[in-house]
């Protein structure tokens, strides 16, 4: 919206200035003979700057500072250009036109270029810096599942993360749609996600930024996962999720993924085959005679020959551990006091 306003003002100013020049008493003979054509041609020349502006990559920055320094640098450049061109156009009837064009085009290009590169641009004057102070290294791109999960907020509280957290606008929209769902469970999940996001934004130690993503033609028909991967590739960030499928899709395309399940599993206590533990058998397993219990961190423990011990504590020996991005399971057998 900001660029649309700037381009509209620029178009109106160009139309007024070119119209004054075309209708001026001291105008070149060619313009006097073809005023309408001259007006169109001159307007096309001025709008070439706008066409060049469309190819620039967009970033975010302090708008007021960028506009101020853009106008200042543009004005200085236009004066330098006019002085450099003075010997060439001194006797030309196009002298005033050249001065007007440089005075308009140079500030416009400087303002738009600073707006586009505001996060990376560093001004060459001491103590004047446009680059945004971004914490840490590469940013984290938050997925809907990671926000609803809530563990990302707990990780931030531990001061482990020091990078910028980025929430694309389509992720926020998906959270809102989930929160407005007619299903109670789904609605509660969406509201929980919005609460977690508000908690992250309220934390002064956390740098959370909403990243606006335009719904262009290239985005139509793409899933949320695919758009997340595109944003991560564009910003050079890492996707934070607990979605196993998104993990695979991003990895195939060379995008780094921080899987919250992997992080949680890496912090769980390690149990090796042969170690002894005690669990409370909660229910029977899928196979005959199996008993199932859980550790304090939620890890499922499957014990052979413990199906009859439901509701009681059992000493077991770990036989194997199965761990992947979906979680971790421990398999064991009952502790035989006579054997040991």
Image (cartoon, rainbow, N blue to C red):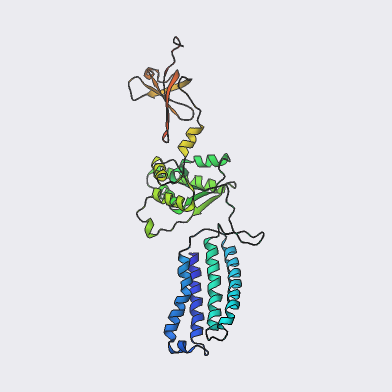
Residue 234 x, y percent position in the rendering: 46, 53
Residue 68 x, y percent position in the rendering: 60, 67
Q: Residue at x 59, y 53 (%)?
A: 133
Q: Residue at x 43, y 89 (%)?
A: 33
Q: Is residue 175 left or right of residue 207?
A: left
Q: Is residue 88 left or right of residue 39?
A: right
For the residue pair 51 and 214, the one nearer the viewer reads as 51
Residue sitting farthest toward the right: 126
In the rendered view, tell whether residue 262 sits above or below residue 292.
Answer: below
In the rendered view, tell whether residue 309 sits above or below residue 154.
Answer: above
Q: Is residue 176 visible?
A: no
Residue sitting farthest toward the front: 88
For the residue pair 5 and 23, the one nearer the viewer reads as 23
Residue 75 x, y percent position in the rendering: 59, 72
Residue 156 appears in which quarter of the rendering? top right
Residue 38 appears in which quarter of the rendering? bottom left
Residue 93 x, y percent position in the rendering: 53, 86
């Amino acid at each position: 919206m900001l660029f649309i306003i700037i381009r509209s003002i620029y178009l109106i100013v160009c139309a007024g200035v070119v119209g004054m020049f075309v209708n001026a008493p001291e105008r070149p003979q060619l313009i006097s003979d073809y005023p309408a054509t001259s007006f169109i041609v001159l307007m096309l020349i001025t709008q070439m700057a706008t066409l060049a502006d469309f190819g620039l990559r967009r970033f975010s920055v302090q708008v007021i500072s960028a506009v101020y320094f853009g106008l200042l640098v543009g004005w200085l450049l236009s004066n330098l250009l006019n002085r450099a061109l003075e010997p060439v156009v001194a006797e030309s009837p196009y002298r005033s036109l050249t001065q007007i064009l440089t005075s308009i085009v140079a500030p416009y290009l400087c303002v738009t270029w600073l707006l586009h590169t505001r996060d990376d641009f560093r001004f060459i004057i001491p103590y004047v810096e446009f680059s945004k102070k971004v914490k840490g290294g590469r940013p984290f791109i938050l997925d809907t599942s990671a926000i609803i999960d809530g563990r990302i907020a707990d990780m931030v509280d531990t001061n482990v993360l020091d990078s910028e957290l980025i929430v694309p606008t389509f992720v926020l929209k998906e959270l809102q749609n989930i929160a407005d769902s007619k299903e109670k469970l789904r609605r509660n999940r969406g509201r929980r996600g919005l609460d977690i996001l508000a908690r992250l934004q309220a934390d002064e130690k956390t740098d959370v930024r909403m990243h606006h993503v335009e719904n262009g033609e290239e985005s139509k028909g793409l899933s949320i996962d695919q758009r997340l991967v595109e944003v991560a590739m564009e910003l050079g960030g890492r996707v934070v999720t607990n979605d196993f499928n998104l993990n695979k899709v991003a990895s195939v395309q060379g995008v780094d993924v921080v899987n919250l399940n992997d992080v949680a599993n890496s912090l769980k206590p390690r149990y090796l085959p042969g170690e002894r533990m005690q669990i409370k058998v909660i229910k029977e397993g899928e196979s005959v005679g199996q008993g199932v219990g859980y550790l304090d961190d939620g890890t499922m423990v499957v014990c052979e020959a413990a199906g009859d011990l439901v509701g009681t504590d059992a000493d077991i020996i770990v036989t194997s551990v199965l761990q992947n991005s979906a979680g971790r399971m421990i398999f064991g057998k009952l502790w035989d006091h006579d054997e040991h």
